[in-house]
Image (cartoon, rainbow, N blue to C red):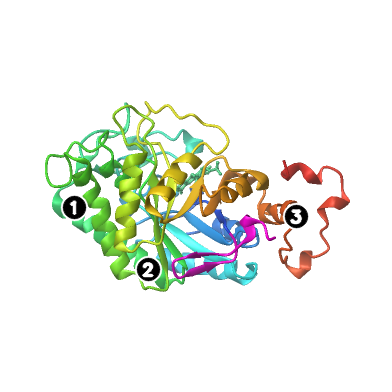
Amino acid sequence: MTARLFQPLDLGPCALPNRIAVAPMCQYSADDGSATDWHLQHWMNLAMSGAGLVVLEATAVERRGRITHGDLGLYSQANALAMARCLAAARAVALPGTKFGIQIAHAGRKASAQRPWEGGRSLQPSEDAWPTIGPSAIPFAEGWATPAEMTEEDVRHTIDLFVKASVRAAELGFDEVEMHMAHGYLMHSFQSPLSNKRTDARGGTAAKRLSTLVDLAQAVRKAVPKRVAVGARITGSDWVDGGLTVDNGIALAGALKETGFDFVCVSSGANSLAQKIPTGPGYQVHLAEAVKKATGIVTRAVGLIATPAQAEEVLERGAADQVAIGRAFLDNPRWGWHAADALGFDLPRPPQMARVKPNLWPGAGYIRG
Ligand SMILES: Cc1cc2nc3c(=O)[nH]c(=O)nc-3n(C[C@H](O)[C@H](O)[C@H](O)COP(=O)(O)O)c2cc1C
């Protein structure tokens, strides 16, 4: 029988050849939001990785919604053209059936930061910092800029920017778009009681905190053509007392399903430095499992899933429908080939590389653990 990992999956209208997704991962290498040669080689590599779905990194809906100066954006025609160039090259070398998705994002109060390798802290004025926005005027952490509290008009305008960027992505030919509603960025900060202290219609109760995310989802689903799968990365836990729990993740996933969203990817954390995350292999899988069981929406698990056997086990026991793998793909952009070998699946490789036989040399089993 075909391993679960290599069985096809429908994300709504998007027919995937297998259940492996490359997780969205910022490369901090864009030029005013536009993809560069770094993205060209990176996406071309991932296109041949064996993953059925390659999700491109968090892509900002406006310039001030970037985390760093190096983030991708889809807020200008120049951004769209640069992305079209790299996407066309990636598609040209992709393994048959490979689909491409993109994460649409606004960094909110975590915007205007240094690249991770520059320190990852809030930018200083000398570093061309910019003003940030959020649900409440509460900084992410000590030493971070205080965001301006958004007005209702700001919220509606920002939702409109998410719609515009998502439609642009659909026009560029992406098969899947996913809204970033996790990791402490703008949408997560509206959902979490740690960052949303509003007393208007967008704060005060769990339902009111959720309303901004639901309004966004409705607007995006309405505007994006039906041939494109639409979903979100959501929070399964803030890992902080008094923060979001898996019940909030279930409530969000249920609401997204009602708006016509096709899937969720369940992540967690990154909205507070007080978080206590029990990291370890598959540490977020139980959150995905709870969301899937409670809502029935197509669910992707992510987080320290790194070996083919581990990924297969998550699917085999029905904890999730799909797995996303991040760092293991950065380490080895042929991860999918090795997973196919390990699980006995005949994955077509580019004919130029058909003579590769990993078991011809010692040490080739390193990926299989
Ligand atoms: C370099 C890097 C960049 C990342 N950028 C994003 C991003 O753009 N959007 C996002 O939702 N998560 C991002 N993440 C988190 C990953 O998508 C993933 O959830 C996380 O790395 C856990 O999966 P892993 O253990 O397989 O790497 C990033 C992670 C890394 C290592």
On whether residue 187 falls in the magenta region, the answer is no
Look at the numbered discs 1 and 3 and tell me whether their residues touch, using CB distance below 8 Å: no
C-alpha distance separating marks 2 and 3? 38 Å
The label shown at residue 154 is: 1
Q: Position of residue 55 (x, y in %)?
A: 50, 57
Q: Is residue 284 left or right of residue 365?
A: left
Q: Nearer the viewer, residue 316 or 31?
A: 316
Q: Nearer the viewer, residue 338 or 84?
A: 338
The label shown at residue 168 is: 2
Q: Name the image quarter holding the N terminus.
A: bottom right
Question: Mark 1 or 3, which is nearer the eye?
Answer: 3
Of callouts 2 and 1, the N-terminal one: 1
Given the image, on which type of amino acid does mark 2 rest?
Arg
Q: Position of residue 279 (x, y in %)?
A: 52, 31
Identified at 83% across, 63% down, the residue is 355
Q: Which residues are magenta?
A: 1-18
